[in-house]
Amino acid sequence: MNTRESGKRGEEAAEEFLKSRGMESVLRNFRSPCGEVDLIMTDCDTLVFIEVKTGLRYGPDALEFSVGFCKQRRIIETAKYFLLTHRKYIDMRVRFDVVFVQIDTFTHLAQAFSESV
């Protein structure tokens, strides 16, 4: 299995995992001129932009290596673009999460980073 296939399977598994915890799917693989967000979901009254990391190359203890500052900025800018183009979500709170997937193990870091990074 190549990296793209592994990533896609990880995203699907992460989405199902988060749904089982009560979150609802909005979109997968949203692209903007700034970048891409793997999953966009709602958690009650919060719109959640989620980066999925499959394989735990660095592990959840090394967030700065797996989702570094530049990647965080791209996700934040993509989230802003999403809100500009999907106005019905504009009044919701926003959160940025990271989900690490390794085989059948999930590590969900809610509010892993913020716009004030």
Image (cartoon, helix red, strand yellow):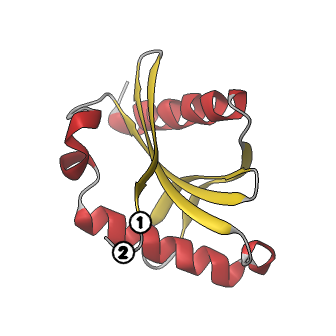
Q: What separation in Å lies between label 1 and label 2 (alpha carbons)? A: 5 Å
Q: Quadrant of residue 59?
A: top left
Above or below residue 61? Residue 88 is below
Q: Amino acid at mark 1?
A: Ser
Picture disc at residue 114: 1
Q: Position of residue 2 (x, y in %)?
A: 35, 31
CB atoms at circles 1 and 2 under 8 Å apart? yes
- What residue lies at 61% left-to-right and 28% top-to-bottom? 17
The quadrant the N terminus occupies is top left
Q: Secondary structure at mark 1?
A: loop
- What residue lies at 29% left-to-right and 30% top-to-bottom? 56
Q: Nearer the viewer, residue 21 or 12?
A: 21
Q: Position of residue 116 (x, y in %)?
A: 36, 75
Answer left or right for 36 relative to 92: left
- What residue lies at 66% left-to-right and 60% top-to-bottom? 47
Picture disc at residue 31: none
Q: Amino acid at mark 2?
A: Ser
The quadrant the C terminus occupies is bottom left
Picture disc at residue 116: 2
Answer left or right for 19 relative to 48: right
Q: Nearer the viewer, residue 23 or 54?
A: 23
Answer left or right for 1 relative to 26: left
Q: Position of residue 11 (x, y in %)?
A: 53, 37
Above or below residue 21? Residue 66 is below
Q: Secondary structure at mark 2?
A: loop
